[in-house]
Amino acid sequence: MKSLNSIDMIPKSVVFAVVAALGCFIAALLAEPLFLGKTPTIIIPQPPDPPSPYFVFCIDDSGSMSGNKREDVKDAAKEFISTRNLEKEKIGIVVFDRTSQVHLPLSKDKHRALSAIDSYRLGGGTVFSAPLQDALNLFEGETEITQINQTYRDRIEEINKAIGEVNQLIEIGRIKGKEMERLLPQTVPKIVLFFTDGQPEHEPPQLGLQKAQELREKGIKIYAISTMDGDKNYLAKMTGDASQVYMVNDAHIKDAFKQMEQQINAELSAAQPDFLRDVPKKQTADGSGDIEIIIGTSRTKQILQSTVWSMLLCLGMCVFIVIVQNLLMRKPLFIPDQLATLCIGGAIGGLLAGFCGDTVFQIIPIVFIGRLVGLCILGAILAYAMSFYIANLDRKWALIGGVLGGFLGAIGFQIFANALSGTSGRLLGAAILGACIGAMIGFVEQFYRNVWLMVVYDPRNFTQVNLGSRAITVGSGTSDTVFVKDVGTKAATFLMVDSEIRFADANGTQTLRAGDSVKVGSVEFAVCSKNVVGIRKFYPMKMSRARELMNK
């Protein structure tokens, strides 16, 4: 007994899934140059560390500072100096009673600073304006402060310029994220650490307040520590902020210095805003610490990519499915006018699907949603187009199957695109998309058929074609549904009219029933129905007729 051996032994859904996947893969490969090229970026220079602070101690050494009080202040000041990073910071020392003396200009020399604390000794009354003036003179005489401030300002302006470019691209959708905050220019923090155990006795109190205000207006911050003999309200006016005044008992001077240092450190460490938090970014490869902000594709290129990609995929699926359908009908694989129509229709359908998907993405900026809509439309257009090439493919169910295939394909594409980034993800995702849409077209053709023809060329060579309201023509022309050699164009016609199967050829017209067969040339046509049980699920011919054909 000879066995049946034909591509028709494979379910149509599997055949169409394979060829549509191949068509999509090749089309995606052709479209890949659209996605190649270096991802455009904007380089944001690494934000500089904030300028390090400069400190000036103003230490009261009037006659009331004798004994343990003076030593406690010295120990506390030396401990503060020891903790500072004088490779970046500077410290100056002013000591005052009724006069004021600079014991150390601003210096990074920690040893000199500690020695200056140890060596001072005055004694007498108290003034505040003179030491504040000396502190101001030290800061204003430090030319390095101006240089540091300018360098930092230039760096921040460079960063803010890049941030402005990024924000413009965020506004038009080229970069996804929230608008970035611009960095604020900072200057070298200038800080006066003022210690006293009393009040100004040898000058009008207003002089000290006026001088302190002058310092604050020039950006100099004042912190004050005082024993309980001092005037807290006066010192609050002098510093401009009561939280920068520490009133302590003589026994807790060291603790006050520590608390003041903690407050200063907390304020100095207040970070710039995390302006890079909500944008796609990466470190540059040169190790400079600069940041690359990744720019999305331009609107024009996005439309070009989505529409051309969809167009090529639609063309790939159309051409490959129709070529296989021609093969099944024993027609020439490439029919010029057929291919021309396919190319025009496929291009229009693909462009429409791509444009619709991109439009949805602009309304709902979620990539998967836009892709899902676009691919569902692509599947519907493709399946509907195939109903003009696959005989009596139900167009309503073809649309539904196409949408479902596009939906499943979009999910498969998303999975592969996420798992395999770049070219490999797009190519495999496209193949999955083609397989899903092709499988649904084949499934709809087989599942929703009621009556069809088994076209038997010989026991090993046969195919099937659905019967329905659209005529099936048999002949040797490229426009005929089923190709039979050497019988002429439209040699015979099969048509269903009101559930009757009508066969017409040169000998006239006759009505056929399921199980009947006729010959056109050397080819036999057997009418099959879901109500006629055969040797295989997909080929339900009468058992006797199937055996007869297989044993010829």
Image: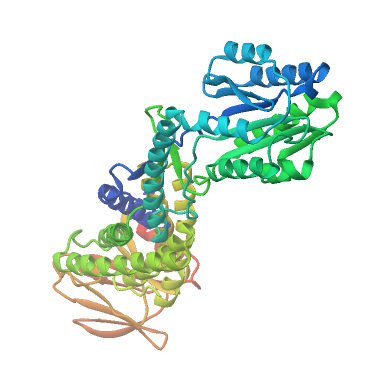
Tell me: 280 left or right of 501: right
Q: Position of residue 423 (x, y in %)?
A: 35, 43
The residue positioned farthest toward the bottom in the image shown: 498
Name the quarter where the C terminus is drawn: bottom left
Nearest the viewer among 515 and 226 is: 226
Residue shown at 71% from the left, 40% from the top: 244
What residue is rendered at 44% in x and 52% in y? Answer: 413
- Image location (x, y in percent) of residue 47: 46, 37
Q: Does the image show residue 198?
A: yes
Give the image quarter of residue 114: top right
Residue 403 quadrant: bottom left
Q: Position of residue 537 (x, y in %)?
A: 49, 61
Q: Give residue 199's position: percent from left, percent from top.
A: 76, 36
Reply above or below: 4 against 250: below
| Relative depth, front residue between 17 and 280 | 280
Give the side of residue 116 with respect to residue 459, left or right: right
Question: From the viewer's perspective, is residue 488 above or below residue 184?
Answer: below
> At x 45% / y 42%, what residue is drawn?
281
